[in-house]
Image (cartoon, helix red, strand yellow):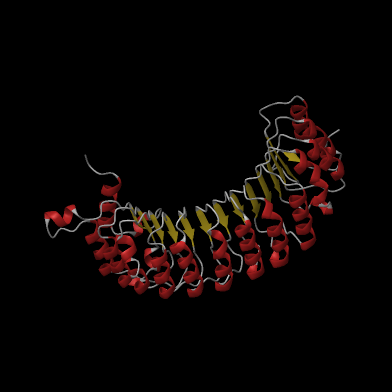
Amino acid sequence: ITSCNGNAEILRRLRNQYTSLYDISITDDDWGNFVVGEDEDLGWLGYFIGKSKCVNELTIYSSGEGENIEAFIEGINRNQSINSLHIGTDLRGVSFRNLRPFFRNNNNLYQLEFNFEVGLECAESIAFVLDENRCQSLESLRFEDCNLGEDGFAVIATALRTYPELEELHLQHNNIGLMGCTALADTLRGWEASNLKHLDLDGNGIDDQGLQTLAAGITNTKLEELHLQHNNIGLMGCTALADTLRGWEASNLKHLDLDGNSIDDQGLQVLAAGVTNTKLEELYLSDNLITGAGLRSMSDYFQSESCCLKTLNVLRNDFGDEGAVALADGLMGNKSLTSLHFIPHQSGITNAGWAAFSKLLCDPSSIESTYLSNHNIGTIGEHIMKHNTPPNIRRYLDLNEHPHP
């Protein structure tokens, strides 16, 4: 009844409730463990999934051609063991609304992921199902590279107003714009007891106004990670974010990713003032417009007793020797930072800059100065291509990572 022996083996294991078969990936090639063909494979798969008590993860990358998609959906609707559902295809036009019984009956689903071009009509169907069949077990929701657009995401965000138990929202590359930021901020503000810890908004066309709008909502969460890579955030956005962090007494934010924006020295200056009293451990500022003057403004933050920062990424910022000296001076006495990442040949550093880092790691001017040098940092430059870091710097860093007894 199947088009290949591999599919027949999957159906046999499903029928016999093999506990070792806990994940099924449906593709149209050999990448997955179930390959849709020209027969009724998909319909039979749905039938046995509906009876399975062992399948935990279901990934759908293909629904084939001429297959019995309706029977497959009916089988999923009967299943109560799936806890992770990843949909990477539009299911050949079958409305997402057809999956309402699955969300209504399944109390184990904690992760739902979409990874295909979601149009407005499909977004409305997804929003309808999420809103009508509130899935209280759902902890992680992903719309990755779906190009939802402002209108599509707005309806999704509105449907999420009854999902304060969500811990992770991955929304990268959806072009949500200002309208999407407004809708998301409204949802976040409306959650009375939010569990949100991870918010990923990379590549969404968010500008200063969008971040200003969004910042008003994040203080109502338990956010630990905020990803804002590859947007268009500048001075006003940094100001809004800094003001939010400064006034956010219950902040648990540990990871802030601002790679690939339009942050200049002024933006970094106001941001540094905003993170001074936070629990931030990782700060990513690569691919921005930061020079030595901006890095100098971080000195007070580095030297504050409340500084918890462990990792700083400033790749592809041409800060030169001025920036290297600013970083070295600022990190003198710092006890938290262990990794300072940049690409040496793209940062404009010469021997003068490396000399400043050498003195930071081992100041030979006196025994006391050597003792008080920074013995915490294990990486300066590239983490993998360490040969681009001068040999004497590498020796000091190795000693920091593997101190002699």
Against 55, residue 404 (above or below) is below
- Which of the image's four quarters has the C terminus? top left
Q: Nearer the viewer, residue 314 or 247?
A: 247
Q: Position of residue 8 (x, y in %)?
A: 79, 31
Asked if one can make out residue 102 in the rendered structure from this viewpoint, the answer is yes
- In the picture provided, is 405 more to the left or to the right than 226? left
Q: Position of residue 65 (x, y in %)?
A: 84, 48
Tell how many labels: 0
Residue at 29%, 57% in the rendered image: 334
Q: Residue furthest front?
A: 192
Q: Position of residue 238 (x, y in %)?
A: 48, 70
Q: Quadrant of residue 184?
A: bottom right
Residue at 73%, 26% in the rendered image: 17
Q: Quadrant of residue 69?
A: top right
Q: Residue furthest left?
A: 366
- Which of the image's four quarters has the N terminus? top right
Residue at 48%, 59% in the rendered image: 256
Q: Position of residue 257 (x, y in %)?
A: 49, 60
Asked if one can make out residue 175 in the rendered structure from this viewpoint, the answer is no
- In the picture provided, is 87 more to the left or to the right than 364? right
- In the picture provided, is 358 more to the left or to the right than 298? left
Against 290, residue 377 (above or below) is above
Q: Residue furthest top?
A: 16
- In the picture provided, is 89 more to the left or to the right than 225? right
Q: Nearer the viewer, residue 38 or 366?
A: 366
Q: Quadrant of residue 403?
A: top left
